[in-house]
Image (cartoon, rainbow, N blue to C red):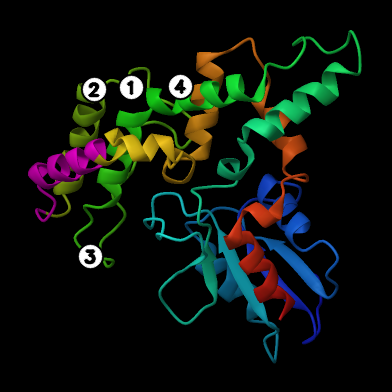
Amino acid sequence: MTAVGTDTTLLFCEGVPRSLDARLLNHVLSGQTGKLIVPAHGKQGFRAFIAGYLESYHPVPPYFGFRDRDFDARPPDLAALIRLPGNRPIFLSYRACIESYLLDPALIEAYWSENHRQGPAWQYGPSPRADQIETWIRDAAESITHYQAARWALARIKPSDRWPEVPTTWTDGSGDLPSSLEKESCLNHAKSLVREYITQSNLVPEKLLEQRYEEYVNKFAAEAFWSRSEYSVWFHGKDLQKAMGRLRPSWLSLTAFCSWAVDRIDLIRYPDLMELKAKVAG
């Protein structure tokens, strides 16, 4: 553990050192002194990690927690941090995850053009136009619409906060897409998760799942949802990244792109990240 004084502010995040999470926060805190980013691994033990980390400090230094929103809360109408209930200053990102901030047409075009100028070692050729990249992102988002509706529906059927989490996917996790993204397949797989959960509680009927699922299917079918690119906020960035790779496997390594982009995003475009910057600055 790195010793810190009461004049050092701790910022806990998901992941490990040099993960996208820690690197994004290094970018957010660029120019600030007296700050220490502490990777806390996964989100499931996030609160416990923070509590354990702080036990040896008397007094406790100022601190904040910041982690992916995932499907744990609906994004607010205005872009802002989402504070978790409780007395700890732990905040969720406005967008679903770090990748959701990176998959930007202009940023992808800049990365592609920069690498193309390096010469023959670049295997992907010249960059498509930004509007073609935007279409790529949108087409990928459309392909996962029913999967995202199922994940949101599963996230909203837990009887109360006291109950265990209902899984929000039948795959190995975000970024691991199911083989079929069709509506019936997504709903049937979601129902199978609910049936398993019913063995613990009879308070989660399949009917509620179907109701929630249709709500999100309808929301994601609205013209305004697409014209305003709201999928960039509501859809999980890791799923979107995977769908983009599946749709255009020869276009680009998005893993390499994200590693490049995380240090270069324009923070002013993201009010929640600017809000975090201000909070940590004190």
Marks 1,2: beta carbons within 8 A = yes
Residue at the image position 45 percent from the left and 37 percent from the top: 173
* Residue that label 3 marks: 160
* Amino acid marked by disc 1: Leu
User: Which of the two labelled residues, at mark 4 and mark 3, occupies the earlier sequence position?
Assistant: 4
Magenta residues (range): 202-218
Q: Position of residue 101 (x, y in %)?
A: 60, 45
Give coordinates of residue 76: x percent, y percent: 40, 60
Q: Which amino acid does label 3 sit on?
A: Ser
Q: According to the image, label 2 marks what residue?
A: 185
> Which label is found at residue 139?
4
C-beta proximity under 8 Å, tags 4 and 3:
no
Residue at the spot 76% in from the left edge and 30% down from the top edge: 110
How many numbered discs, if any?
4
Mark 2 closeness class: few <14, some 14–19, many ≥20 residues within 10 Å: some
> Which label's residue is closer to the chain start, 1 or 3?
3
Distance in Å between CA atoms under marks 4 and 3:
35 Å
Q: Is mark 3 on a helix, strand or loop?
A: loop
**Numbered disc in front, either 4 or 1:** 4
Number of residues whose C-alpha sits closer than 10 Å to that of mark 3, classed few (under 14), some (14–19) or many (20 or more): few
Q: Is the magenta stretch mostly helix, strand or loop?
A: helix
For image coordinates 28% across by 33% down, the residue present is 221
* Foreground pick, 267 / 32: 267
Give amino acid for label 4. Asp
Q: Distance between the residues labelled 1 and 3?
A: 29 Å
Give the x, y percent position of residue 14: 60, 55
Mark 2 belongs to which amino acid? Ser
Q: Are marks 4 and 1 in contact (CB under 8 Å)?
A: no
* Picture disc at residue 181: 1
